[in-house]
Image (cartoon, rainbow, N blue to C red):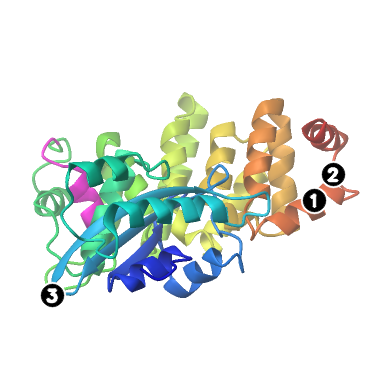
Amino acid sequence: MDTIDTISQLLHSSNSQFRIYDIGRKIEKISKELFEKIELNQLPYPTPSQGHACIAIAFWQKQSPQPFLWLLKLPLDERGLLNQGARNHFIAIIVEALGADLTQSVNEQQEELLKNNPYLYTPAQYKLAALNSKIKFELKQTPSEYLSPFVSYITGKNGWDNWQAVGVQGITDFAVRIKTKTSTENYSKLLVNALPHLPSEVLLPLCGALENETFSVDLINALISLFKEKCKLSAKTGANVSLQQHLLRSLASNCQHLHVEKLVAQLLQQQQVASELLITISGRCWLTLANNEQLMAFLEHLVASDDQALFNSVFKDIVSIPAIRPIVFQCMRSPERSAVLSKAIGQLFN
């Protein structure tokens, strides 16, 4: 083979069709043009997760549309740029094992080489389900057998307590089709009507699936209303923070919508915000923090938790995100920061 310098070149040289997804914070497609710039260190990785780029690459040959899948965890440097040595090492292992044909059947020796690749990793099951649904939907393949039972369940005709036939794969298959409109089905409208009735056994995995999708303002508003209702109930009966976390997560891919930005602003105006919700905001809805006022309010709440280890962890996480990094530095230097925040930042660097 000619010299292969990037994963993109490796895929092109094998005549593979391919798609690339970030699978670190959420599951979202990365354009080939953006990925090439990331590989050439022209841009930092946009959504780092604990110092790594977590990437799924689905690739296939034209004559065989069934895709192969690589799930990679590649280290980033302190600027968020891809570690070239690690990337090159990954390529070398693949070339040694497979040569030019990435989609060939492998023998025992080749399989052993591939298994020992240190950059392959296994995400959580719910992410694998969501990724599988997204790839199948984008490649116009048949959804799993679990979609139909979930659509039937979400109508409510069989009773909201009869969720035992619902599978996570059916929920993720539903979520990727949330914008689907046919003569008989409008998934978004179905879900808006169903939301107030869903038991937590269905609602929690559904929120995890919705975090990867953009959807209608009606559904955004329905999820926000449910979040606010749960906040009211928790004030009376004790907080169900886990449920609030999941509802906030469900809005992740819509966090730049005015209504979601307003919700987060209202949360940060409260006297107290649970640490779990702060972690969800920074981990899933980080773009709501892309202005000085909002980010400063967030940092003040974070430091109010009186947990330096938590502060250090979340601070290091958000400062690694290219879209937020410059605003974090502005807040660090702001004369309006509290003495407590100044002290926490000082301890971070000490």
The amino acid type of the residue labelled 2 equals Arg
Helix, strand or loop for disc 3: loop
Image location of residue 277, percent across then percent down: 54, 38
**Residue that appears at 80% across and 37% down:** 345
In the picture, measured across the screen, residue 33 lies left or right of residue 172, that is right
Label 1 to label 2, Cα distance in Å?
A: 7 Å
Region rendered in magenta: 164-174
Helix, strand or loop for disc 1: helix
The amino acid type of the residue labelled 3 equals Ser
**Residue that appears at 10% across and 39% down:** 165
Q: Is residue 112 magenta?
A: no
Is the stretch drawn in magenta largely helix, strand or loop? helix
In the picture, measured across the screen, residue 85 lies left or right of residue 230, that is right
Residues at marks 1 and 2 touching, judged by CB atoms closer than 8 Å: yes
Q: Going from the N terminus, do you reach mark 3 or mark 1 first?
A: 3
Residue 337 is marked as 2
Q: Going from the N terminus, do you reach mark 1 or mark 2 first?
A: 1
Instruction: Tell me, yes or no, if residue 277 can be seen here.
Output: yes
Residue on which disc 1 sits: 331
Q: Nearer the viewer, residue 129 or 271?
A: 129
Residue on which disc 3 sits: 183
Give the quarter of the image for residue 161.
top left
